Every structure is written in structure tokens, then in C-alpha cells.
């Protein structure tokens, strides 16, 4: 017989004795909380219904099965019934990696209903001091014979103190568990999501890296000497259109409207170890967009297309192209990360050390905002959901506009005569701002 206890004004608990595998009986209890203001009649009716359901589940063995379900067994169902039908391969790979790397080894054997907020809080806290696990193979396990420099570099890495997980990675683990338990609540596996009571990890965003006006011009000059037209196209698509690496890899010549001067961004090249390299959807719904191209880029893309046609005629049956803009010498698709690796080498050789391929996208947005282009237009080009996201991420680009605003405010002092000494003192304090003597009223 199920028991019913009232434990507060709007809090109840039901329970039933369940036979254990060793023949003994143990209590299984479940709390039920109601919104403030719920009537006594409504609460009691719901509690009695849940108590009857619990008693029936105990008699049929369903309650015992739920009690024995561990996080690991639930995870298998979660991946099969929720992730695979609803999520992209790359997202599924990320979640399964987080689960298999640390979550399941630590918590997999714990019954689902016994995972408390305190237990999960301790797990999240432990991740802040957890060492990173490197993916570099030892020299003796590599297919080709390693060079002396590679052997020495690996030895130094082994001797160095291991790095701990970043705050951003810890947040990924938090979100992974939160999403998993959220689905468990939807499927009536749990009454509430225990992660709702776990402190969400905070992390500081790294300072955004981007090129200024002069560096962008220098990049264009350096790129003019690059013979690989496919690579030049990849860099300029990121720099002048603000495209992500995957979006660049997924573009085909059929996406370019040379008459209207636009390009359709509707797919992206992605990669997972299970699937290999493949074409999938863009990052978000808002990432599907149509943007205008500068004339110089249209000319380059037209030249690249003609070059591909010329090479295809020379190679004949050996040409593997399908219209992809950024491709290998025989037209075959590049690996998802190849343009990024090519960029790293190019950047180091041309005076842009530490600048990533993705920083070209940051440069695009920063230059537009600093040049007074409307934030809504910039958000549209980047594929952001709204202008607030753009302004939040690229607040640094508004510095030039802020200086211009200060210059406007200076005009408010036109009724007051400013002396040469005042101007000299102001100029020494703010050398980037040009002050002029105020007009006499």
C-alpha cells in the first residue's frame, strides 16, 4: 500500500515498499511539489493518483526496473531515441565524446534516480582541476618514422605539467548533463532535472583576435602573390563575406549569382571520425543567408571557375570536381580543416602569427562595424540571429565610433572659450582625439 505524506504547504511525498533482489524490502519515495496557490483539493487528487500509479508499478515490476536503470543504460536510450533522430552527426559526436570521456566512467553505474544535485555539483567542480588528455600519438606508434624534432617535441610535452580543462570545456559538460536530464524529465524518468540546482560554470571569453585596416590591406597584398587560386578564394570568402570555415568548404559555383553579385550560403562541410568529411546544414537556421559580394571577389571567383574548367579539360577522366569552389588540384573535396592548415602556414610566413582562419570572420565584422555599417546588416552577413548578438561579440569595433561621439560632445562646449593651454592638456591626455578651439558665442 502506497503512503502519502504532506511535508509543507505545497509539498508532498509518496512512497511504497519494493522487494529487492536479495529478498528484503526497501522504501522507494518520490517528492511532489506544486505551484504556490494550488488548492488543497487539486493537490490531494493529484497525489492520490500518483500514489496509485506508483503502487501499480511496484506490483508489475516497472518501478523496480526504473530503480535499477543507471545513467549508462539511460544514455544508450537517449542517444538512440533522441539524439540520432533529431541532431546533426557533428553534435552527436560531441555529446558522445563528452559522455564516454568523463561522464560515464565517473557516474555511469549510478542509478538514474540517485543522482543528486550535490553529487553532480562535485563532479562539475572536479572537472576544473582535471588534466587534459592529449591526442598526440607516441612516436613509436605512428605510421611513418618521426623526425628528431618531433621526438624531442613529444618528450618535452610529456615532461611539462599537464594543462587542466578550460572553463569553456567544463561548461560543455554542464550543458551535456543538463540536456540529458531534461529529456529524462520529459520521458517521466525523473520528477525534476537535478542540474537545475547545480551552479552553472562561468568562463571568460578570450580576447577576440582580428586584423586592423592596415593589416587587412597587407593581407590582400600578400595574397596577390599566392598561386593557389582555391586557397585565395577561401581566404577572401572568409575575409570579405565573414564566412565560417565549414561554409567556405561547402560552397559551389552554382551558389554564386554573377549577374546579381550575390552568393547563397545554405550548406557547410563538416567532419566526424564516424562519418568522415560530409556536406551538412549550416550552424543555425539564421546561417542560411544570401549576401552581396564585392566586385573584386566576383572577378576572382569567375577566374577560379575558368581555371577549374581548363584543368578539367586537361585531366579528363582524372578530374574529380563537382563544382566545389575550394577543392584539391584534381577537383576532389578537401578535408574540412585543410584550408585552416594552409592558412596557418601562410599566416606565419607573411607576418600574421597567431591569427586563425576564423579570425578572418572576426576581422570582417570588426571592419564593417568600425566603418558605421548598420549592426543589423552585419548580423545578416554573419548569419547571427539578431543584432544584439553581433554587438555583444564585437563591442570592441565600436571604439572608433565612440571617439567620434566624444568629438560631437566637444561641440557642446562651444559657448565656452577654450585656451591653448586647455587644448594642450586635453591633447596630452587623449592623443587619439583631435580638439579644436571652441567658437565664441
Image (cartoon, grey):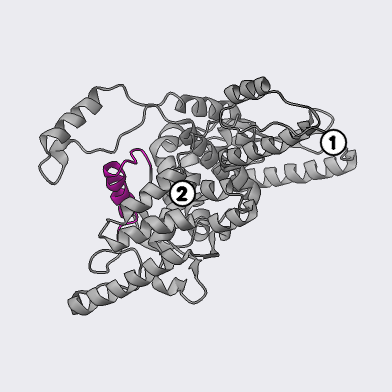
Relative horizontal placement of residue 419, taking residue 229 as reference (left or right): right
Q: Quadrant of residue 32?
A: top right
Residue 280, above or below 337: below
Picture disc at residue 391: none
Camera-near label (1 vs 2) is 1
Q: Nearer the viewer, residue 333 or 11?
A: 333
How many marks the image carries: the answer is 2
- Where residue 78 sits: x, y (%)? 51, 50
Q: Is residue 354 magenta?
A: yes
Residue at position x 36%, y 38% from top?
354
Residue at position x 48%, y 34% from top?
206
Q: Secondary structure at mark 1?
A: loop
Is residue 269 in sight in this rendering? Answer: no
Q: Nearer the viewer, residue 388 or 366?
A: 366
Q: Secondary structure at mark 2?
A: helix
Residue under label 2? 76
- Where residue 302 sits: x, y (%)? 37, 72
Q: Quadrant of the C terminus?
A: top right
Residue at position x 13%, y 37% from top?
140
Q: Quadrant of the N terminus?
A: top right
Where are the magenta residues, as a range?
334-355
For marks 1 and 2, the one nearer the N-term is: 1
Picture disc at residue 36: 1
Residue at position x 43%, y 31% from top?
106
Marks 1 and 2 in Cβ contact (< 8 Å): no
- Mark 2 Cα shell of 10 Å, populated few (<14), some (14-19), many (≥20): few
- Where residue 138 sits: x, y (%)? 19, 35
Amino acid at each position: 500500500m502506497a503512503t502519502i505524506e504532506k511535508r509543507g504547504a505545497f509539498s508532498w511525498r509518496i512512497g511504497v515498499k519494493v522487494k529487492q533482489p536479495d529478498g528484503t524490502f526497501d522504501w522507494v519515495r518520490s517528492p511532489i511539489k506544486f505551484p504556490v496557490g494550488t488548492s488543497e483539493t487539486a493537490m490531494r487528487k493529484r497525489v492520490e493518483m500518483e500514489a496509485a500509479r506508483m503502487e501499480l508499478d511496484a506490483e508489475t515490476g516497472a518501478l523496480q526496473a526504473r530503480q535499477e536503470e543507471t545513467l549508462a543504460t539511460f544514455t544508450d536510450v537517449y542517444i538512440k531515441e533522441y539524439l540520432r533522430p533529431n541532431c546533426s552527426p557533428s553534435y552527436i559526436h560531441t555529446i558522445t565524446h563528452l559522455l564516454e570521456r568523463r561522464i560515464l566512467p565517473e557516474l555511469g553505474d549510478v542509478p538514474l534516480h540517485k543522482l543528486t544535485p550535490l553529487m553532480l555539483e562535485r563532479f562539475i567542480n572536479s572537472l576544473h582541476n582535471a588534466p587534459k588528455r592529449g591526442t598526440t600519438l607516441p612516436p613509436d606508434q605512428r605510421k611513418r618514422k618521426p623526425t628528431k624534432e618531433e621526438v624531442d617535441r613529444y618528450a618535452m610535452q610529456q615532461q611539462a605539467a599537464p594543462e587542466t580543462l578550460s572553463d569553456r570545456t567544463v561548461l560543455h559538460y554542464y550543458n551535456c548533463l543538463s540536456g540529458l536530464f531534461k529529456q529524462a524529465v520529459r520521458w517521466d524518468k525523473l520528477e525534476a532535472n537535478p542540474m537545475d540546482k547545480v551552479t552553472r560554470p562561468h568562463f571568460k571569453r578570450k580576447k577576440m583576435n582580428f586584423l586592423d585596416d592596415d593589416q587587412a590591406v597587407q593581407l590582400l597584398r600578400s595574397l596577390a602573390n599566392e598561386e593557389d587560386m582555391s586557397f585565395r578564394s577561401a581566404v577572401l570568402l572568409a575575409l570579405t563575406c565573414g564566412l565560417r570555415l565549414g561554409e567556405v568548404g561547402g560552397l559551389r559555383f552554382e551558389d554564386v549569382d554573377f549577374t546579381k553579385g550575390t552568393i547563397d550560403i545554405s550548406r557547410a562541410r563538416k567532419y566526424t571520425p564516424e562519418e568522415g568529411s560530409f556536406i551538412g546544414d549550416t550552424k543555425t537556421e539564421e546561417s542560411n543567408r544570401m549576401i552581396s559580394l564585392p566586385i573584386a571577389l566576383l572577378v576572382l571567383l569567375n577566374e577560379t571557375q575558368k581555371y577549374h574548367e581548363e584543368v578539367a579539360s586537361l585531366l579528363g577522366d582524372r578530374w574529380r570536381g563537382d563544382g566545389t569552389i575550394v577543392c584539391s588540384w584534381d577537383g576532389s573535396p578537401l578535408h574540412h580543416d585543410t584550408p585552416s592548415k594552409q592558412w596557418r602556414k601562410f599566416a606565419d610566413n607573411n607576418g600574421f602569427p597567431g591569427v586563425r582562419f576564423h579570425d578572418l570572420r572576426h576581422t570582417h565584422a570588426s571592419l564593417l562595424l568600425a566603418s558605421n555599417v548598420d549592426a543589423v546588416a552585419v548580423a545578416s552577413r554573419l548569419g547571427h540571429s539578431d543584432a544584439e548578438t553581433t554587438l555583444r561579440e564585437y563591442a570592441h569595433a565600436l571604439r572608433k565610433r565612440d571617439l567620434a561621439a566624444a568629438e560631437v560632445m566637444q561641440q557642446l562646449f562651444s559657448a565656452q572659450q577654450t585656451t591653448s593651454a586647455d587644448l594642450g592638456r586635453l591633447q596630452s591626455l587623449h592623443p587619439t582625439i583631435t580638439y579644436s578651439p571652441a567658437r565664441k558665442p
